[in-house]
Image (cartoon, rainbow, N blue to C red):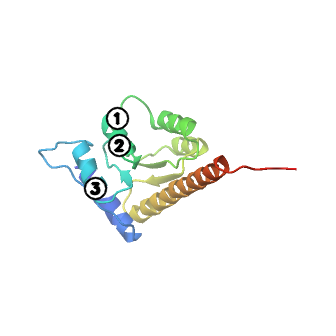
Amino acid sequence: ADGQTATALLLESLLALRADVIFHVPTRDEGHGLHIEGIEDLLTRGTRVLLTCDTGATAHASVAHARARGAQVLITDHHVHWSSGLEILSAVKSLRPTIPVILHAAVDDRTVVDEALHAGLHAFVPKAPGQEGVLGAALRSALQIVDFEGQVASEQERHRDVLDHLSIGVF
């Protein structure tokens, strides 16, 4: 029920922020996990950013499929037994230094949170009653950063296209 609870909380938070949100909870027939059929359901209904809830860490083919179809994928999953959160944060930041990473956990050790913030964590939201709005705000901020980066990349590409097709004389 972790994923269903996470989906409900995330949906509630994003709707409170007036986000345009649709969701897919796998049926018993689909089984647990991030499946291409569910991804296709969301993509055909207009999803551009796919947020997972308690799943996706090992769904490499499904994530690749979503990305190939033009979706951005943000995975939230604590089922990562092969590494620690700090190692994952470090790996993500080494590949995409500007990507926002949010830690939503019941971490009692302030040292771990401080290390994560120092390593580039975008936001820490403790798992505690009343934090839903904080999580929603952190997600909104992260999505705005991702959207801004996409706009910058689009503008860079547009300018590159103009320069590729323009003869420039300088004297």
Residue 44 in the image, given as x and y percentages of width and height: 28, 56
Q: Which mark is residue 44?
A: 3
Above or below residue 9? Residue 124 is above
The answer to whether residue 2 shows anywhere in this view is: no
The crowd level at tag 3 (other Cα within 10 Å; few <14, some 14-19, many 20+) is few
> Mark 3 and 1 residues: CB-CB less than 8 Å, in contact?
no
Quadrant of the rendered image containing residue 22: bottom left
Above or below residue 88? Residue 156 is below
Residue 158 in the image, given as x and y percentages of width and height: 59, 54
Above or below residue 61? Residue 169 is below
Of badges 2 and 3, nearer the viewer stands 3
* Helix, strand or loop at mark 2: loop
- Write down the residue under mark 1: 60
* Helix, strand or loop at mark 1: helix
**The disc labelled 3 sits on which kind of residue?**
Thr
The answer to which of 123 and 156 lies nearer the viewer is 156
The answer to which of 87 and 46 lies nearer the viewer is 46
